[in-house]
Image: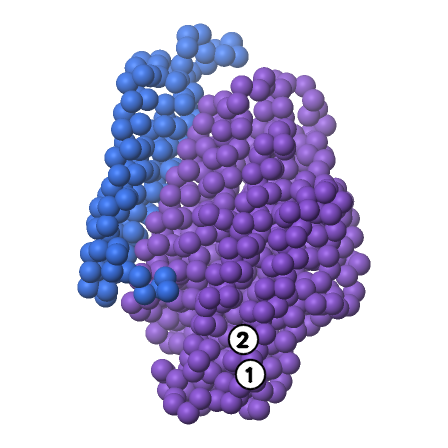
Amino acid sequence: MEPLMAITIGILFAAAIYMMLRRSIVKLVIGLILLSNAANLLIFATAGMVRGAPPLVPKGMTAPEAAVADPLPQALVLTAIVIAFGVLSFAVVLVRRAWEIVGADDLDQMKDTDT
Amino acid sequence: MMPQVALPILIPLFAGAVSLVFWRSRSMQRFIAVAGTAGLLVTSLWLLATVRGDDIQVMHMGGWAAPFGISLVADLLGAIMVVLTGIIGFAVALFSLATIGRGHEAYGYFPLLHLLLAGVAGAFLTGDIFNLYVWFEVMLVASFALLILGSEKAQMEGAIKYVTLNLVSSVIFLVAVGLLYGMVGTLNMADIARRLATLEDDGMADVLAMMFMVAFGIKAAAFPLFFWLPASYHTPPVAVSALFAALLTKVGVYALFRVFTLIFHHSPGYTHEILLWGAGLTMLSGVLGAAAQFEFRRILSFHIVSQIGYMLLGLALFTPLAIIGGVFYIVHHIIVKTTLFLISGIVHRVSGSYQLAALGGFYRSHPWLAVLFLIPALSLAGMPPLSGFFAKFIVIRAGIEAEAYGVTFIALLVGLLTLYSMIKIWAEVFWKAPPDEEGDGAPKAVSQREMWLMATPVVGLALCTLFIGLNAEPLYNLAEASAGQLLAPERYIQAVLGTNGEEMP
């Protein structure tokens, strides 16, 4: 399972960076979305891939019996998803407003602030 | 129970919530803005006094002891930064009363200001690395919204660059936190530091250190990751520019100081060497960028970049004196840079332009403003007896003592070029005769009351830099104590994890 996960995350990162290097601001936002999803999956993978084993400690013991996935990264991912959702919805609105105000979908035409 | 550790976060959060309740009442929002930031300033001074008296203060949220719960940790560096947040928040709130238009206030300028301050204070006080990420995001979301208030074309273009690069930085930070957790199995910074020291070195720690360096380097606007800053900082209303210039990049610098003194201090030959050259190039590229600019706030924005280099230089040299210099420089820089931005705001309010070519004759019409500009400008360039002189002196002395002659030479050269930029502004804005044609925006008459509201924070901050310059010893002692804490991470670890910090669970 881990190698498959690693490849998936790698492809997601590569796709995200490719999209962000395009000139269109819509593709830029798609790139950002892919990027944050790749990061979330990566954190999820650090917990370890275990199937069907809830992280519960049996009564009278101090550690779970079998190997379990660490629940804490899943809590982190949950937080990160919520934050990314908020930030990315802002980014989508921003791109739309920028398109309305600047009148272009091309980052090459947004150079007023660079010179 | 130490309420003052949490109060600098809770007061702005609460003030932000209350001013959201009074969404329609302009006067109430303005009152809360002043009262909330004043409350933040008072509690932050209380916190600093406590930390100075009784060493590092720790508060475990919800009563869960470290490393399981989230801890708020106030050491001297954190407390100093919170005090600066309070000072700047208060000054900018006063200044905003006169300069922020009704249109911006109606779209929630003041609630966002409070939330930004809460995020910044939270980042300075948290002892948990994932919580640091959360506070970064609180701060960033508030700053995104502040940056585009007004929806002008330049703001949109600047915001796209700002948002993109800051999101990339957040993702890198998040990935680094995830990998670090996978390696050491904890998120508490003190616990991370302790466990990382016991792991055998397989190079992974260095990889993570570099990821943190890139993530915080983007936030701090270090070379070569600073391009978002001069593209966006001159676009929003000037009070927002001043607030960003004072606090946002410094959160990145603070995070670098925290991470590279507490967690990744094991291979300074590798990580701190990269930081050293990054610092030198940051200084140089920032100041050269400023030399090519002819817009008031863009010059100042590029100077933020160049000043960040001095602070990073203090961290990179990693000697006690250098860390003292770094902390001293942060304090000096935040105060002086805010003053300069606020002065550019007054100039804009009076004449309606930021372009140097369209300005002039201010020495004749507003002589007090000219004097007020010279104090922070010369301080930024490092002229004695102002605060910048001592800040530069300590850093450069540390550089010579550490025999890093190349970077020290750059630091001296950059000081000279900074003076050139400041003299350029002085000559264009204050000295030369006013140009015949009017500026782009027709200037509006400034009432006496508005002028007082704008001038009071500027005078107060200018007096701060004058005071630090004339009486540098108290601040030096404070910076020395703070450097002592930073260079002895076991004190931080002990304070957070309790007395049994040595044994491993």
Circles 2 and 1, Cβ within 8 Å, touching? The answer is yes
Position of A7 with respect to B32 (left or right) is left
Frontmost residue, B197 versus B84: B197
Q: Quadrant of residue B233?
A: bottom left
Chain assignment, label 1: B
Which residue appears at 60% of the width and 59% of the height? B414
Secondary structure, mark 2, is: helix
Q: Quadrant of residue B154?
A: bottom left
Query: Where does the image place residue B215, in percent across and percent down from the top left?
Result: 46, 41
Give the amino acid type for the residue marked by disc 1 in the picture.
Answer: Phe
Mark 1 is surrounded, within 10 Å at the Cα level, by few (under 14), some (14 to 19) or many (20 or more) other residues, namely many
Relative to residue B74, is residue B157 depicted above or below? Answer: below
Relative to residue A115, is residue B204 depicted above or below? Answer: above
Which residue appears at 46% of the width and 78% of the height? B356
Most distant residue in the top direction: A65
Give the amino acid type for the residue marked by disc 2 in the picture.
Answer: Ile
Q: CA distance from mark 2 to mark 1?
A: 8 Å
Residue that mark 2 sits on? B425
Which residue appears at 22% of the width and 55% of the height? A106
Chain in purple on the image: B
Residue that mark 1 sits on? B430
Frontmost residue, B203 versus B495: B203
Query: Where does the image place residue B341, in percent across and percent down from the top left?
Result: 52, 70
